[in-house]
Each structure stands twice: as C-alpha cells, then as structure tokens.
Amino acid sequence: AFNTRLSGMMAQALAPTGALMAFLSLLTGALWGKPMWGAWWVWDARLTSELILLFLYIGYMALTAAIDDARRADKAGALLLLVGVVNIPIIYFSVKWWNTLHQGSSINLAKSSMATTMLWGMLLMAMCFWMYSIAVALMRVRTIMLERERNTEWVKNLLIGGEK
C-alpha cells in the first residue's frame, strides 16, 4: 500500500510521549478523583478506555521492540495502531454514550462554562504539552532515522562532516 518508512518512524517516536501523557492523565485523574468521588479508581467508561489506550501504547512499543527487522516491526505496529485507533472516538464520546462520572465538555468554539482564568490556564498548559510533545517527537524521529540509516553513506558523511 503506502510503504512509507517515515510513518513507522514517527509512530515509534510518538508512542513513548503518548504513553507518558496517558499515564499522567490517569495518575492526575486518580489524585483528583479520590477527594471528589471517594475512590482512586472506578471502572468508568472514560477511565477504562483511557487505560486501554495506555496498554495499546505499551503494547505497540513492546511489539516493535520485539521484532528485529525495522520494516516488519513497522508493519506489525501499523496493524496494532489500526486496531487501536478505534479506541479514540470511544474515549471522546464515552461521556455521551454511557452514564459516567465524567461531565461533558466544558468548552467549545462558541462558549465556555469555565472561569476565564481557569480557561486561559488550561489553554496555556495544553499549548505547552503540545509544544513539548512535538519537540520530543521530532528529536526522537531524528535519532530513529540516524539509527536505521547508520550504515548508509549520507549518515557516514554527516558524522564525518560533524567532527571537523
């Protein structure tokens, strides 16, 4: 089909950051949930689907690391990602589809039910998380490219040229 190498490398670069963000959302949600709901964890639809997302990230990283051939690892990882992408709308719409502890969206394009200071703080932190994720992913994909292409002439020239 598309047989692009960059998409596999980008997925491999993004997976650890995605897993970190999923873990942090579950951890901070538990810290917030204990005083609000009286429990660290409940089998709520949003929480459970977010936990599945974390397991998908970990499974993807384990699967691609277990296969030595990079192209085969990319193909196997792509199949797992295709299965895992089904979970994204489930996470997003879970509060609308099922009766959960989580409330619906507090903001949309037309209006927000959040206090202005909270909204600006949330938007600032969201932008910071995006910037961090993009920066780390680009650094990781560069490293992955250099690792995969280490025996090619252009990488050898890059390394020799960088030492002068």
Image (cartoon, rainbow, N blue to C red):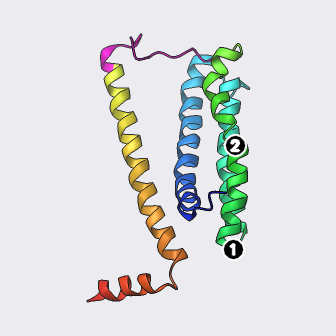
- Between residues 155 and 19, which one lies in front from this camera angle? 155
Identify the residue shown where x is 67% and y is 52%.
58
Q: Amino acid at mark 1?
A: Asp
Residue on which disc 2 sits: 84
Instruction: Give the residue at x 35% y 20%.
Output: 118
Q: Quadrant of residue 102?
A: top right
Q: Are marks 1 and 2 in contact (CB under 8 Å)?
A: no
Q: Is residue 90 above or below residue 84?
A: above
Position of 59 relative to 71 (above/below): above
**In this figure, which residue is indicated by the disc labeled 1?**
69
Looking at the rendering, the stretch of residues picked out in magenta corresponds to 100-117
> In percent of the image, x 68 and y 54: which residue is there?
78
- Toward which corner of the image does residue 103 lie, by quadrant? top right
Instruction: State the image coordinates of residue 14 (x, y, percent, origin top left).
Output: 53, 53
Q: Position of residue 37 (x, y in %)?
A: 62, 18
Q: Quadrant of residue 107?
A: top left
Depth check: 88 or 78 in front? Answer: 78
Residue at (36, 45) in percent of width and height: 131
Q: Residue 12, image x and y in percent?
A: 57, 59
Q: Which secondary structure lies at badge 2?
A: helix
Label located before the other in sequence (1 or 2)? 1
Label 2 is placed on what type of residue? Gly
Asked if residue 56 shows in the view, the reply is yes
Q: Judge left or right: residue 68 versus residue 114.
A: right
Q: CA distance from mark 1 to mark 2?
A: 22 Å
87 lies above or below 65: above
Is the residue marked by circle 1 packed among few (<14), some (14-19), or many (20+) residues within 10 Å? few
Label 2 crowd bin: few (<14), some (14–19), many (20+), radius 10 Å? some
What secondary structure do most residues of the magenta stretch adopt?
loop
Q: Nearer the viewer, residue 143 or 157?
A: 157
Q: Secondary structure at mark 1?
A: loop
